[in-house]
Image (spheres, rainbow, N blue to C red):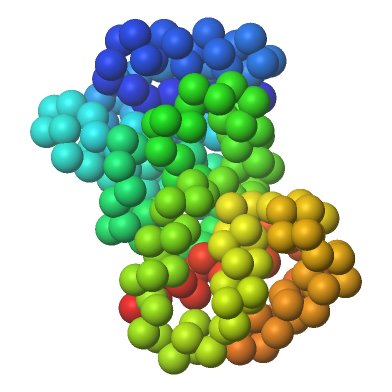
Amino acid sequence: MRVVLAEDLYLLREGLIRLLEAHGFEIAAAVETGPELQRALVELRPDVAVVDVRLPPTFTDEGLQAALAARRAVPGLPVLVLSQHVEQLYARELLADGSGGVGYLLKDRVFNAGQFTDAVRRVAAGGTAMDPDVIAKLLRSNARDEPLAALTPREREVLELMAEGRSNTAVAGRLFISEGAVSKHTTSIFAKLGLAASDDDNRRVLAVLAYLNRT
């Protein structure tokens, strides 16, 4: 699996390279600026991009903007964003088009090698890998929206876990309920949000996230 990595901090970039290579990934390119990232993504078309939000030259949102520009040139390009903090605007921009694998993780999660590499693979496969803190903030920011407000507390718990990319089996395990109960909650969630149900968990989560992105 080919990865383009963008991180301006040398030690973190080298650490990520070694971590990914140790888990069987091929580093197609490792860059440290926004312009370098955009060129690498468009020219190399990797299986997934792992991108720091803030890159030189301005250290604002170069990484995100380069990834978004590359997704416009290469529709569906999987992108996993790394950030030091939960920044809702960046998360919303990433989720706006609802196409291709997407992820938003806090850098603290990188220190768990298993969780991080699992997230990279999930995004590369077209799924989602959203940090629980990001999902919680997106849900709170939409709390006044009528359809979302109609969800029960249990349905909101199921929605949060779905948005993290968890399967029905994993949701059932976390909430100590049956898979049948998860399916019923999922059906109710889609009905209340006006979303068509799907057997594809990844598309389902992307649809929910696309809905949460609307304000």
Point out the image quarter for the N terminus. Answer: top right
Tell me where residue 109 appears, x and y as whole percent: 48, 32
- Tell me the residue at 40%/64% (across/down): 138
x 41%, y 8%: residue: 14
| Outermost front residue | 176
Q: Please state if 60 lies on the left or on the right of 49 as rendered.
A: left
Residue at 24 percent across and 34 percent down: it is 54
How many numbered badges does the structure rendering display?
A: 0
- Residue 27, position in %: x, y? 53, 16
Image location of residue 29, percent across then percent down: 45, 17
Given residues 201 and 75, the one toward you in this image is 201
| Residue 23, quarter of picture | top right
- x 53%, y 89%: residue: 150
Height in image: 203 above or below 84? below
Q: Quadrant of residue 125?
A: top right
Q: Is residue 159 above or below residue 6?
A: below
User: Considering depth in this image, is 134 or 94 the residue closer to the camera?
Assistant: 134
Rendering coords of residue 140 (x, y %): 38, 70
Residue 159 occupies quadrant? bottom right
The answer, for residue 63, to whether it is visible in the render is: no
Most foreground residue, 71 or 80: 80
Q: Nearer the viewer, residue 165 or 6?
A: 165
Quarter of the figure that contains the C terminus:
bottom left
- Is any part of residue 100 visible from this angle? yes
